[in-house]
Image: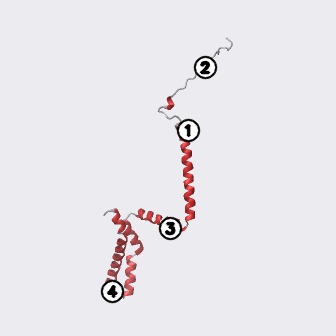
Amino acid sequence: MPLLSRLFLRKRRYNDISVSIQEHIAERVDELEEQGMPHAQAKQRARREFGNVALIHQRSREVWQWRWLEQIGADLKFAWRQIVRSPRFTIAVIATLAIGIGAQTTIYSVIHAVLIDPFPYRDAMRMVHFHLYDKDPVPDDL
């Protein structure tokens, strides 16, 4: 099944799990009632035998879904709610990040241009500079 259809059919699958769990409990209640147990007591015993319904929901969901993807989605929803709830804080955070990233980019660009790659041509480190000078300079009055 494609990923998108899995994501869109998630609620239906969750409902299917709930219905399936309720059917299992109802079947056990019917079995206990046939053995002569009152309905309320049979229902309580069937739930106790079945176990923690919420835990079974969670384990069933983990079998056919990507839990980390849902957690990321929940985190993004929460972040969006916080952004909408306090727009001034959001603007301050975005401005601070923009200034910090811009300053860091500028500093690294300058360091790269000046220290790391100062000459704009190939094999710049192999260049040699010769400076000629005379040890015995000629006097000017000759």
Q: Residue 116 location, x and y as percent?
A: 53, 38
Mark 4 or mark 2: whose residue is earlier in sequence: 4
Mark 3 or mark 4: whose residue is earlier in sequence: 4
Alpha-carbon distance for marks 4 and 2? 115 Å
**Residue on which disc 1 sits:** 114
Classify residue 46 by image quadrant.
bottom left
As drawn, is 33 to the left or to the right of 133? Answer: left
Alpha-carbon distance for marks 3 and 4? 49 Å
Q: Amino acid at mark 2?
A: Tyr
Q: Residues within 10 Å of mark 3 (few under 14, many from 20)?
A: few
* Foreground of the two, 131 or 79: 131
Image quadrant occupied by the N terminus: bottom left
Residue positioned 51% across, 28% down in the render = 127
**Residue on which disc 4 sits:** 33
Q: Residues within 10 Å of mark 4 (few under 14, many from 20)?
A: some
Q: Amino acid at mark 3?
A: Arg
Mark 3 or mark 2: whose residue is earlier in sequence: 3
Residue 24 lies, with reference to residue 64, above or below; the image says below
Q: Nearer the viewer, mark 4 or mark 2?
A: 2
